[in-house]
Each structure stands twice: as structure tokens, then as C-alpha cells.
Amino acid sequence: MLNQQVMTQTFNTIGLIGKPHHEGANNTLTALYHWLIEQSYSVLVEEQTGQQLSIDGLNLVSINQVGEQADLAIVVGGDGNMLGAARVLSRYDIAVLGVNRGNLGFLTDLDPFNFEHPLKEVLQGEFITEKRCLLEAKVLRHNAVKSRNSAVNEVVLHLDKVATMLEFEVYIDDHFMLSQRADGLIVTTPTGSTAYSLSAGGPILTPNLDAIALVPMFPHTLSSRPIVVDSDSEIKLKLSHDNSDHMNISCDSHVSLPVMPGDEVIIRKQNHPLRLVHPKSYDYFKILRTKLGWGSRLF
């Protein structure tokens, strides 16, 4: 079983988080809200989400208050919405469930048009739960932390300019591993291994693995290959003083941390994992087959 446990916990207070300026997501949120109220659940609505809904008497709260006060957060949107919510909600002891209103939907399970039956099972305590690790990235300049943020999928070192090389060294737990000339480097969690990393030729890591993958982006040597390390490893990137000034560390492609020549970047597993819940019918390999177009059974 892929780091999954069938649980029997029930939920009382539900938080709803949506996708900004998306009519379809708003329609699903409206249907979800009314259905949950009919089932006598206490419902909190994230304030930016609630301002887009034509419903009177909503209990509007911040996303941090959702994490503090709710037992379960339901995120309606695509994987991008889930990533943004997860970076905040992972700090709290809250379960998170996704309703797919995006494209790929690796992290969002429920069908927006047929959510009632699987959601009812989840709310009654019949669900699968798993913990997904996040990464924390810190930018150091002259031994002082200049910026930091977290990522569910990946931390990426890259230049603003396309097809321009940068130079850096990689250390694992303070052991020098390699020097690299490349367009950049992707450091991915198992969750992110089916995202940007996959497009760059990285390995798929099943969610139960306590591992992090490092995937070079268009390296200037044929011997450079992705490598998988233990998730408790500290990854240090030392940026050459000869690099351009236009470098960034991107977290899930949402948050950008500027870096300068000579900076160091420290990437570690975040202390607080995301507690993701799925309906009992959840099948990770079925999702891979569906999303990646893998073949069906021969026998």
C-alpha cells in the first residue's frame, strides 16, 4: 500500500477553498456548500472564495483560519490551486481533499459533477489518508537568510533568460557531489515527480518513498543524470560568481525567490507534511495510467 491508511475518523467542520475567477469552480462550490449545509455540517468559506459566491450568510475566514478551525479542507480547482492551499494548510493538523476543476488533476480526486457519494463516504470516515512531504528552500547571502518559502512539488533553480547556461555546485549533507553547467536544476518531491520534473526526464517517485530527486535541466554534459537521495538529506547549491544576476529559485512555479551570483541555496524537507485524503476507490497507478496514457491490461 502506497503510504496509505484506511481511516474511520469523521469530520464536523468543513472549509471550502476555491479557484479565483473561475465560473465552473464557483458553480461547484455553490453546490458543495448547499449540500454540506443540508447534511448539517458546519461550513467555513475562505474569504476570497466566498466573495465570488452569490450566497448570503457565509462564514468567511482566512485560509489560515480554515487550517486552525476546520477538520477538513475541500479545495475546488486544479492542481495549482491545491499546491497554493497546501503550502499554507500543511502547517496545521487538517485533512485536505481536492475536487478537480483543472486539467491534469493528479492531486484533486473528486468529480465536480458527481461528488456526493464519494464525499459522503469520506465525511462518514471511510477514506484513505497519506502524508505528502514538502520542501523548504532558503536563499543565503553572506551567511544570512535573505528569503525562504516552501514547495509541494518542486524547487527549481533557473535563469530568467531562455537557453542560457548557469554554473553551480551541488552538495548533499555537506559532501560535494558535482559541479554543473546547465539551464538549471529541479529538486522534486515524490508528489512533484509527475509534474515539471517528469517533463525534464526525471523519474516517477511513488508517494510512499522518503526520497527527493535532483533533475538537471539541459545539462552541458551527457553524463549528467537525475539522482534520487534520501528525503532527510540537506541539499546545498553554491552559485558561481560568474553567473548572470537574473537567477531565481521557483517554488511550485508560484513563488519566486531572487538569487545572486555567490549565493547559496539550502533545500530540505519541511517538518510539517500535507495530510491528503482520498475516497476509498483511490488508486495511484490507475491515475498514472489515465493521466499519462499508459496501456491497459493485456490479460
Image (tube, grey):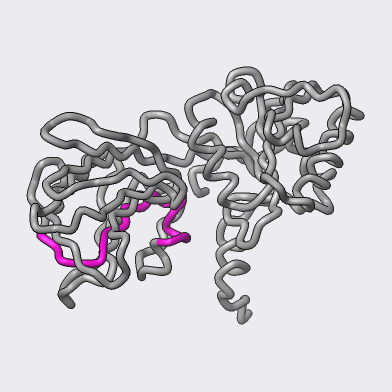
Residue 219, image x, y percentages? 21, 70
Residue 284, image x, y percentages? 57, 56
Q: Residue furthest top?
A: 69
Look at the image and tell me in which quarter the C terminus lies.
Answer: bottom right
Q: Which of the 4 image quarters holds residue 7?
A: top right
Q: Residue furthest right?
A: 38
Q: Residue at x 58, y 50 (%)?
A: 107
Q: Residue at x 68, y 22 (%)?
A: 61
Comparing 145 with 245, the one in front is 245
With 224 as the anchor, is 121 left or right in this view?
right
Comparing 132 with 80, the one in front is 80
Residue 50, image x, y percentages? 75, 32
Residue 147, image x, y percentages? 30, 34
Give the residues drawn in magenta, as a range: 179-196
Is there any visible trace of residue 279 in the rendered image? no
- Can you say whether 201 is above or below 35 in the image? below
Does residue 52 belong to the magenta stretch?
no
- Can you say whether 55 is above or below 59 in the image? below
- Can you say whether 79 is above or below 201 in the image? above
- Can you say whether 167 is above or below 59 in the image? below
